[in-house]
Image (cartoon, grey):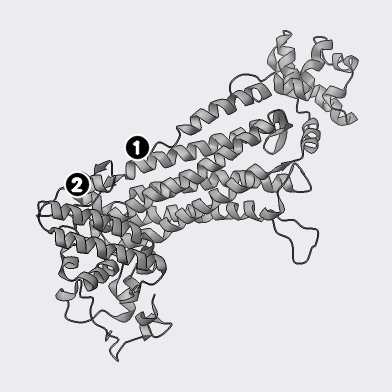
C-alpha cells in the first residue's frame, strides 16, 4: 500500500466521517452504479492489489495481446495501439524500478495498470478494456503466472535431479543398511538409496509438466461469464500469448481454479517427498547414526550449546510441508460450494497459490544446492549394515536354492539369528560348524552370500541394489530426465 492510500495504520480509521463512510472518491472504473462511496474498511478489506500486483508482467502481457487483437478487428486503430504499447512499456519499467504508485482504492493489479495507462494516454487506455472483463483478465493472468511458475519449479527440480545422479554414481557401491520400520532389513548401496530419491522427484517433475499442459488454455474472450458481443478473434490472442488452446466454455473459463488446485496438490506431494528426504538427513546426521554430514553453510549452531551443529535447512523444509498441505486444503475448500460462474470468493485463491509457488521454489532450490554436497561417512554406513543381521534373508534364499522350503528356511535362519543375538555374533562371523548346526543344507559356499558385498551383488536385476544395476539405472535416468518435463 502506498503512503497516499492511508494516513493511519488502521485502514478503517483513515478518511472516515461520523457515519463510517469514506470521503474519498468512488473508484471511477466501476462507480457509476453507486450512489455513495465505499466504506474505507470495506475498500481495504476487498482489495487484492497488495498481493496480486506480483502478476503485473502477466497483466501487461495480456493487455498487449488484447490490444493487438482489437486493432486487427477494427476496434482500435494503429495510433491507439502504438500509444497503448508505449504506455504499457513505460508502466512496466516504472513497476520494475519500484516507482509505481499502487492504490488500494483501485482494488487490484488490473485496475491499477488500466488507470495508470488511461492517465498517461487518455481515451485509448479506456478503449483497451473493450471485449473483456476483469473476470477473464484475472483468469488469464493467473494461468500465465502459473505457466511461468511451473517452468521455474521444473528448472529447480531438474537441477536437483541432475545433482543426484553424480552422487549416486560416486556411491554406487557404498554399502549401508536398508530399513523397514526403521529397523535394519537388508544391505543396500547408498547410490541405490539416492536413486530412490531420484524416482520420487522425477514423478514430481512429470506432474509439473502435466499441470502446465492442462493450464495452458486461454480464458481471455470469456469476458464476465458469457463471452462478448464484439467480433473478437480469440485465436489471435491465443497465438500471441502462446496458449495451446482456448477455453471452450466461457462459464468454466472464468470460474474454475482447478489448475491452481492441481499445482498446490503437486506442491504438497513434492514437499512430502522432500520432507521424507529431510527426515532421513536429520536422522543420519545425528550422533546416533553418523551416516552423513552437511556442509556448515546449510546448518546453524546453538546459542547455548557450543557443540551443536543443527541441520536447519532440512528441518525447515520438513516444516514447510505443513503449509503446503494447508494451501491445498484452502483452495479445495474455497471452491467446493461455489455456483457458476465467478464469485468474489476467488480473490482468496491467490495468497495460498502464491505461497505454494514460493514454498516449492525455495525448497527445491535449497535441496538442489544441498544434496549434491552431502558428505558421506562410508565406514559408519558399512558398520551399521553389519549390525542387525542384514544378510538373514540372503541365508534364507540360499537354503531355498539348496532345496529347503522357504518357511522351513525362515525358521532355520530365525534360530541362527537368535543364536547370534545371544552371543553377539553376526551371521557372517559364525563358523561353518556353527551354521551347519542349524541345517545340514549349509555348505562352505554360504559365506559368498553372507558378506555385505555378496548380498548387494546378488540383486543385479533392473531396480536392484547391485552396484552394476545402480550404474545402469543412472544411465537410463539421464535419458528419462531429458524427457520428463514436456510442457508442449
Res 354 visible: yes
Left or right of 28? Residue 96 is: right
Quarter of the image where one finds residue 343: bottom left
Closer to us: mark 2 or mark 1? 2
Q: Nearer the viewer, residue 371 or 461?
A: 371
Badge 2 vs badge 1, beta-carbon distance below 8 Å? no
Q: Residues within 10 Å of mark 1 (few under 14, many from 20)?
A: few
Residue that label 1 marks: 488
Marks 2 and 1 sit apart, C-alpha to C-alpha, by 19 Å
The answer to which of 121 and 29 lies nearer the viewer is: 121
Quadrant holding the C terminus:
top left
Give the class, few, some or many, for how many residues have Cα within 10 Å of label 2's Cα (few <14, many ≥20). Answer: some
Instruction: Please report the residue visible at 72 percent of the width from the left and 36 percent of the height from the top.
Output: 183
Instruction: Assign a secondary structure to mark 1.
Output: loop
Percent position of residue 11, x then y? 38, 80
Residue furthest to the bottom? 18
Which residue is label 2 attached to? 236
**Residue under the image location 26 percent in, 79 percent down:** 38
- Where residue 200 appears, as percent x and y from the top left, is 54, 37
Mark 2 vs 1, N-terminal side: 2
Question: Which residue is pictured at 34% across the width and 67% down the height?
Answer: 48
Residue at (71%, 10%) from the top-left corner? 401
Q: Report whether 173 appears left or right of 14.
A: right
338, above or below 425, in the image: below
**Residue 390 vertical position relative to residue 264 in the rendered view, above or below:** above
Above or below 202: residue 255: below
* Mark identifier at residue 7: none
Question: Judging from the image, what secondary structure is the residue with disc 2 in?
Answer: helix
In the displayed structure, does residue 383 sit left or right of residue 177?
right
Amino acid at each position: 500500500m502506498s503512503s497516499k492510500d492511508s494516513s493511519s495504520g488502521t485502514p478503517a480509521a483513515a478518511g472516515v466521517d461520523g457515519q463510517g463512510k469514506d470521503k474519498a472518491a468512488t473508484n471511477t472504473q466501476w462507480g457509476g452504479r453507486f450512489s455513495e462511496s465505499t466504506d474505507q474498511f470495506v475498500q481495504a478489506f476487498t482489495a487484492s492489489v497488495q498481493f496480486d500486483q506480483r502478476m503485473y508482467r502477466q497483466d501487461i502481457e495480456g493487455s498487449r495481446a488484447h490490444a493487438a487483437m482489437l486493432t486487427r478487428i477494427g476496434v482500435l486503430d494503429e495510433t491507439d495501439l502504438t500509444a497503448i504499447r508505449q504506455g504499457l512499456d513505460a508502466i512496466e519499467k516504472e513497476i520494475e524500478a519500484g516507482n509505481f504508485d499502487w492504490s488500494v482504492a483501485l482494488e487490484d493489479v488490473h485496475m491499477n495498470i488500466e488507470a495508470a495507462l488511461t492517465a498517461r494516454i487518455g481515451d485509448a487506455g479506456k478503449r483497451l478494456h473493450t471485449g473483456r472483463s476483469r473476470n477473464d483478465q484475472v483468469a488469464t493472468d493467473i494461468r500465465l503466472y502459473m505457466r511461468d511458475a511451473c517452468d521455474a519449479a521444473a528448472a529447480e527440480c531438474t537441477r536437483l535431479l541432475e545433482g543426484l545422479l553424480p552422487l549416486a554414481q560416486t556411491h554406487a557401491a557404498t554399502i549401508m543398511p536398508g530399513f523397514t520400520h526403521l529397523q535394519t532389513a537388508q544391505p543396500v548401496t547408498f547410490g541405490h538409496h539416492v536413486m530412490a530419491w531420484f524416482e520420487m522427484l522425477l514423478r514430481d517433475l512429470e506432474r509439473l509438466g502435466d499441470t502446465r499442459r492442462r493450464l495452458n488454455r486461454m480464458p481471455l474472450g470469456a469476458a464476465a461469464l458469457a463471452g462478448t458481443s464484439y467480433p473478437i478473434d480469440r485465436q489471435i490472442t491465443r497465438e500471441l500469448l502462446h496458449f495451446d488452446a482456448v477455453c471452450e466454455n466461457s462459464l468454466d473459463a472464468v470460474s474454475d481454479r482447478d489448475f491452481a488446485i492441481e499445482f498446490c496438490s503437486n506442491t504438497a506431494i513434492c514437499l512430502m517427498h522432500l520432507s521424507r528426504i529431510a527426515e532421513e538427513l536429520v536422522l543420519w546426521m545425528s550422533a546416533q547414526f553418523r551416516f552423513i554430514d552437511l556442509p556448515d553453510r546449510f546448518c546453524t549452531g546453538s546459542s547455548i550449546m557450543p557443540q551443536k551443529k543443527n541441520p536447519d535447512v532440512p528441518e525447515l523444509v520438513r516444516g514447510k510441508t505443513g503449509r503446503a498441505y494447508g494451501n491445498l486444503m484452502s483452495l479445495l475448500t474455497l471452491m467446493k460450494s461455489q455456483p457458476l460462474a465467478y464469485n468474489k470468493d476467488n480473490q482468496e485463491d491467490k495468497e495460498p497459490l502464491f505461497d505454494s509457488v514460493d514454498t516449492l521454489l525455495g525448497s527445491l532450490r535449497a535441496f538442489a544446492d544441498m544434496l549434491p554436497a552431502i558428505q558421506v561417512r562410508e565406514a559408519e554406513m558399512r558398520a551399521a549394515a553389519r549390525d542387525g543381521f542384514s544378510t538373514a534373508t540372503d541365508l534364507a534364499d540360499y537354503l531355498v536354492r539348496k532345496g529347503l522350503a522357504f518357511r522351513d528356511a525362515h525358521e532355520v535362519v530365525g534360530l541362527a539369528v537368535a543364536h547370534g543375538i545371544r552371543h553377539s555374533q553376526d551371521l557372517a562371523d559364525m563358523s561353518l560348524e556353527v551354521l551347519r548346526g542349524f541345517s545340514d543344507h549349509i555348505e562352505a559356499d554360504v559365506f559368498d552370500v553372507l558378506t555385505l558385498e555378496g548380498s548387494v551383488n546378488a540383486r543385479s536385476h533392473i531396480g536392484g541394489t547391485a552396484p552394476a544395476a545402480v550404474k545402469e539405472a543412472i544411465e537410463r535416468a539421464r535419458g528419462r530426465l531429458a524427457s520428463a518435463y514436456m510442457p508442449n
